[in-house]
Amino acid sequence: WQLNPWRACALASALRALGPCCDSSTRRAVLGELARRGNGVLPSGEVADVAARTLAEAPQDVFTMAMQPPVPSPNSRAGLYDAIGYRGDARWGATLIEALRNTGRPSNLTALLAAIEAVARLRLVEAASALLQLAQSEGDRAVRHAALRALGSLGGGFEVESLRPFLEDPATRGPALEALGSLGAAELVPDIVRWLDAPWAGDRRDAAESLARIGDVRAVQSLSQRARREVDDGVRAALWHAVARIGGRASLDALTRSGDDASARWGIVELLL
């Protein structure tokens, strides 16, 4: 018989309840009882996360058994990928990368998103090329966004310039700016600065937040100039926050020259603290 994730979930719960007194013979007995009872009914998507967290805490031998095929449904695969991410176990990296490349059926969307999130948790740089392919695809927008954010979480391992084209696509600009900020992509600061003058307030705010995370002093002048003529209160606050977060003398000078702007005054306090 095959130990599917949900049977493994029950086994992990039973073994944890038994505590340190649980020896190998007891484990075999519990395993045999689960085999006798069979698979039962697969849980709903809401239960999948609970099962994944239980698997994340299971002994290594239990989790290894749970990873054996067959895995009966996309929700089951999603639960396993979540558990890999929770465990922080990079030994299953090849399984995750295979999941990123196996995108042929729409029914795999839940599992695919879970695999992307697990890759991000593990900062699995080996998955960078697969993530880039997903981001470049014409598929589901949520998948493209998740892939870009995951690339930002890797911390490197690929050419940051490969994210430049995503800034030109309105469908991917926001997550691309977020990823560049997470990566500290100082080499693309001029490309990001250009979006401070975007027609959409959301793009201007995303660009400001990206520059704030990168922290390159070259952006201070552009941020402060945009802040002085920004009409959206929320975006203006994000611009001055970015100036303050970059820090240094240039930021302090820009903030003190801002006049009576309340957001800039808060920025001075933020910088000095």
Image (tube, rainbow, N blue to C red):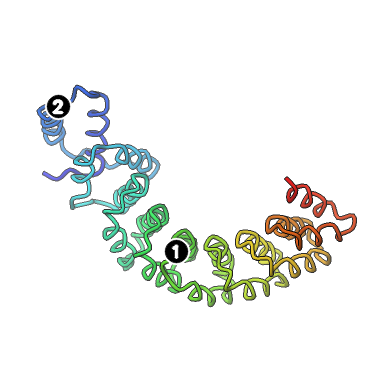
Q: How many marks?
A: 2
Q: Residue at x 18, y 52 (%)?
A: 69
Residue 107 lies left or right of residue 206; in this view the side is left
Q: Residue at x 79, y 51 (%)?
A: 268
Q: Which mark is residue 260?
A: none
Residue 124 lies left or right of residue 175; in this view the side is left
> On the image, numbered disc 1 is attached to which residue?
147
Image coordinates for residue 233, horizontal then vertical, percent:
79, 57
Q: Nearer the viewer, residue 42 or 234?
A: 234
Judged from the image, the secondary structure of the residue bearing numbered disc 2 is loop
Picture layout, residue 189 above or below residue 208: below
Going by the numbered disc 2, the residue's amino acid type is: Asp
Q: In the rendered view of the protein, which quadrant contains the N terminus?
A: top left
Disc 2 and disc 1 in contact, CB within 8 angstroms: no
Q: How far, Cα to Cα, is label 2 from label 1?
A: 43 Å
Going by the numbered disc 1, the residue's amino acid type is: Ala
Picture layout, residue 22 above or below residue 223: above
Image coordinates for residue 86, horizontal then vertical, percent:
37, 45
